Amino acid sequence: MKQLFLLRHAKSSWDDPGLDDFDRPLSERGLKAARLMGRELVARDWLPDLVLVSSALRTRDTWRLVAAELPTHPRVALTEALYDASAADILSQIRQADASSGSLLVVGHNPGLEDLAKQLAGPSSEAKAHKRLEEKFPTAALARFVFEGDWSGVSSARLTHCLRPKDLG
């Protein structure tokens, strides 16, 4: 069984209005939330084999803080293709993942990430998780999916969890 995790970057700072969107850092709240989500991945033993990270600063920083909490060091690929990506673009990146990876974490942006999560959530999804996803997929939210098959063919999966930092801490 494959596990797919979709993690929206943590809350970014708007303190410097002159910064390009790509270069915005995390806010204090975002720093805390990213660490919290890293600890939650460890507590649930949801350790990715492979991580795809948008090359924007806030996604790289989110991953750096999550990774600091992990006991393992998964393979990581930074990619500009995930920045400002549509659901279809993100899914294309997922479908190209190494077939030997049993669990994949994607750290990206809305609206593409949320749109993809809603698109992937199949009919066997957990009702509570699906309801949370439909309500809101805020910064540092994590959606967990499981499915049988290969990354190259994923189009629908079972949403098992939709975690938001405010629900954890």
Image (cartoon, rainbow, N blue to C red):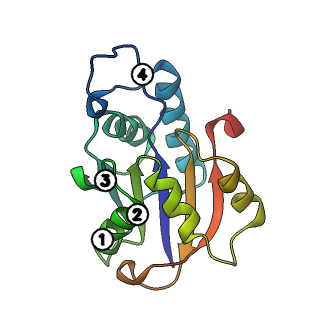
Q: Using the image as rendered, state which of residue 64 and residue 45 is in the foreground.
A: 64
Q: Residues within 10 Å of mark 3 (few under 14, many from 20)?
A: many
Quadrant location of residue 89? bottom left
Q: CA distance from mark 3 to mark 4?
A: 20 Å
Picture disc at residue 82: 3
Q: Quadrant of the C terminus?
A: top right
Q: Residue at x 62, y 76 (%)?
A: 122
Q: CA distance from mark 2 to mark 1?
A: 8 Å
Marks 2 and 1: CB-CB under 8 Å?
yes
For marks 1 and 4, the one nearer the N-term is: 4
Marks 3 and 1: CB-CB under 8 Å?
no
Q: CA distance from mark 2 to mark 4?
A: 27 Å
- Three-letter code, disc 1: Ala
Q: Nearer the viewer, mark 2 or mark 3?
A: 3
Q: CA distance from mark 2 to mark 3?
A: 14 Å
Q: CA distance from mark 1 to mark 4?
A: 31 Å
Q: Residue at x 48, y 30 (%)?
A: 11
- Three-letter code, disc 4: Ser
Where residue 26 appears, as percent x and y from the top left, is 40, 26
Marks 1 and 4: CB-CB under 8 Å?
no
* Residue 97 versus residue 34 in the image, above or below: below
* Residue 75 versus residue 61 in the image, above or below: below
Q: Secondary structure at mark 4?
A: loop
Q: Secondary structure at mark 2?
A: strand
Q: Secondary structure at mark 3?
A: helix
